Image: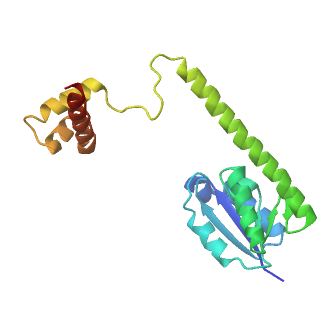
């Protein structure tokens, strides 16, 4: 029979020190029969979770990983489902306290199917909201596709003029515009002048 591992995570270091939600998670994990509990303070958005990565390496076939909620495992339902599928493929059971035991059985597969449906729904909602946001933004005459430009054209032109008498480093200190941005702008100007000839 495998070991039962628990994993508890809070979003901020402050929460971790105060022990508010971490204590609650640990208590629930202990009640679920966890023999070994790993804990860390890390936002769900950060991919680098050292304690969690270390725990995944500890798990062996027949072991069970217990968490209080799916969002303790991953930032989104899509990521969570993907991770659960990987664990099940390795013969590791996953017990999500507010959902139930997910194992390689008909019931486990049913829970996973429901999770997948919710994950797909979540992903579709995000895509729909993004598209709606873009359509609204496109109605603005100043809308530009892609990342907004940090510096205006006039600022770049002024910096290029300064380059006639100053070094890249000096211009960067004066304007705050990086050397790489200035080089790109210079190349663009040369290409434009050549195409106009």
Task: Say which of 112 and 41 sits in front.
Answer: 112
Tell me how the rendering is colored.
rainbow
Using the rendered image of the protein, determine whether residue 108 is visible from the camera's viewpoint. yes
Picture coordinates of residue 49, whole percent (x, y): 57, 63
Q: In which quarter of the image is the N terminus?
A: bottom right
Query: How many discs mark residues in the rendered view?
Result: 0
Percent x, y of residue 66: 77, 66
Q: Which residue is drawn at 83% across and 72% down?
A: 33
Q: Residue furthest right?
A: 106
| Image quadrant in which you'd find residue 113 | bottom right
Left/right placement of residue 178 relative to residue 67 reads left
Residue 19 lies left or right of residue 5; in this view the side is left
Residue extending farthest front:
197
Tell me the residue at 60%/27% (across/down): 133
The answer to whether 22 is drawn above or below residue 5 in the figure is above
Outermost residue, bottom direction? 1
Residue 76: image location, x then y, percent: 68, 50
Q: Which of the two residues, 66 or 39, is positioned nearer the viewer here?
A: 66
Front in this rendered view, residue 3 or 159? 159
Whole-percent x and y of residue 147? 44, 35
Q: Residue at x 77, y 42 (%)?
A: 121
Q: Is residue 167 left or right of residue 98?
A: left
Q: Locate residue 187: give its quadrant.
A: top left
Is residue 99 something that shows in the picture?
Answer: no
Above or below residue 103? Residue 41 is: above
Which quadrant holds the C terminus?
top left
Q: In the shown orientation, is residue 53 left or right of residue 35?
A: left
Q: In the rendered view, tell whether residue 105 sits above or below residue 74.
A: below
């Amino acid at each position: 029979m495998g070991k039962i591992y628990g994993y508890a995570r809070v979003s901020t270091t402050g929460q971790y020190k105060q022990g508010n939600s971490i204590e609650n998670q640990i208590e629930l994990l202990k009640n679920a029969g966890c023999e070994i509990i790993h804990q860390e303070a890390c936002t769900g958005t950060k991919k680098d979770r050292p304690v969690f990565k270390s725990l995944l390496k500890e798990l062996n076939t027949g072991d069970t990983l217990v968490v209080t909620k799916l969002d303790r495992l991953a930032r989104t339902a899509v990521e969570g489902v993907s991770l659960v599928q990987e664990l099940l493929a390795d013969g590791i059971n996953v017990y999500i306290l507010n959902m139930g035991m997910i194992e390689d059985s008909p019931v486990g597969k049913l829970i996973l199917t429901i999770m997948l449906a919710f994950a797909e729904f979540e992903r579709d909602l995000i895509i729909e909201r993004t598209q709606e946001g873009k359509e609204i933004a496109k109605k603005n005459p100043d809308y530009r596709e892609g990342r907004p430009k940090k510096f205006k054209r006039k600022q770049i032109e002024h910096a290029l003029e300064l380059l006639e008498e100053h070094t890249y480093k000096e211009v960067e200190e004066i304007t705050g515009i990086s050397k790489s941005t200035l080089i790109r702008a210079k190349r663009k100007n040369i290409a434009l002048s050549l195409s106009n000839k």
